[in-house]
Amino acid sequence: ADAVVSVRDLQVEFPTQIGVVRALNGVTFDVPRGRVLGIVGESGSGKSVTARAILRIIERPGRIVNGDILFRPGVERKGGGRATRRNRGRTGTGGPKEAAPEAGATEETGTGTVTKAPAENSRGVVDLTSLDPTGDRIRAIRGQEISMIFQEPMTSLNPVYTVGDQIAEAILLHQTPDRNEANKRAVEMLRRVGMPNPERIAKSYPHQLSGGMRQRAMIAMALSCTPTLLIADEPTTALDVTTEAQILELMRELQDEYGMSIMFITHSMGVVAQLCDEVVVMYLGRVVERAPVDDIFHDPKHPYTVSLLRSIPRIGVNRGTPLEVIKGSVPDPYSTVPGCPFHPRCPSAMKGLCDTVLPVEAPVEGKPDHNVRCHLYPGSTPAEAASASAAA
Ligand code: SF4
Ligand code: MG
């Protein structure tokens, strides 16, 4: 399958005064081109760090210590056959076993023989980990190819321009050279993100809007850039359910219209169900399961995924605290949990195995695009006994 971004064995550390926090511990997944990937997990699972690593905006002193982030710019036009929403979810997401040739590392090899790809090869693949995080190349990518929307809208809105001007500017840069047309489309975008009086909102400055309005303005602006990849980090969490549903629907529409790829970070399986084609489930800096959305909802494998699904809130009830039904809480990231990181909370944990041996990610039997990291499944136990399936 064609991936716009391939993350391979990504490790990110935050040195602190009381020790090193390994925020990402060998993360591997693909963002499929022209589709919506959901990254789901509790806070502290590494979702936001993953997004920030892709854009190379990890806060100091955090640093990428290993792995590749391969970015393939542009919208794929040649050859056809590209997955669309209408035949979504049926092609492979890639994985360690079918990694792109320029990805020298496979997950958890521990050999330290990572082969670095050249910064940009002949096919236009860029290893984002090899770029200077303050250099021109990554800045250009951030402005034009990968946009990010955050929970906090003031980080992307400019206080000295009206909301309409900012959106029109993005449209002029990315969609049309016609100023009148851009102004019209800006108002239309504001209407589509659910602004009650878009003509008036367009003439407002960010500080004149409420938090929810600013959030919608920022989403309108990010979508107007029609980037190759849009990364959204819980952008609708602060909004009411109706507005959230409206915005998710709009993102879906624009994704179809422009062939955009979206990586949507959320703690909500409800949001995943509404929006996503593929899903990556993260726990404590690792990917524990990844699969097409239908498999995640109808045939989940990892006990953590199962508990996330059980905790989907009913409409209007308990919104915002969906994860409390999972026994225990996320362990302190400073302490290293031996064995499976989920074992202290797992109802299926096996003594003598789960508390001592780290499971590896392996394809689910008969489903090459469904991967799980759990000793309940053959392939995930890296013991000599399981060598046949592990080496396959
Ligand atoms: Fe639970 Fe063991 Fe699977 Fe971890 S490896 S999720 S503890 S069954
Ligand atoms: Mg976060």
Image (cartoon, rainbow, N blue to C red):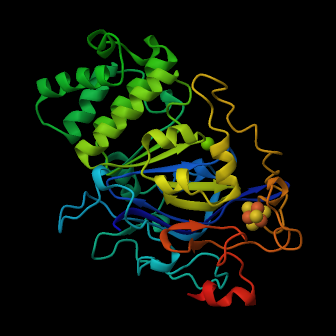
Image coords of residue 181 (percent x, y): 13, 27
The C terminus is located in which quarter? bottom right
Image coords of residue 222 (percent x, y): 36, 36
Identify the residue at image location x=24%, y=45%: 258
Q: Is residue 45 visible?
A: no
Residue 390: image quadrant is bottom right
Horizontally, is 138 left or right of 48 in the view?
left
Name the one closer to the observer, 337 or 347.
347
Residue 360: image quadrant is bottom right
Identify the residue at image location x=29%, y=39%: 254
Image coords of residue 324 (percent x, y): 75, 37
Image coords of residue 225 (percent x, y): 29, 40
Name the one closer to the observer, 21 or 108.
108
Q: Is residue 263 visible?
A: yes
Residue 78: image quadrant is bottom left
Horizontally, is 349 left or right of 318 in the view?
right
Horizontally, is 224 left or right of 378 in the view?
left
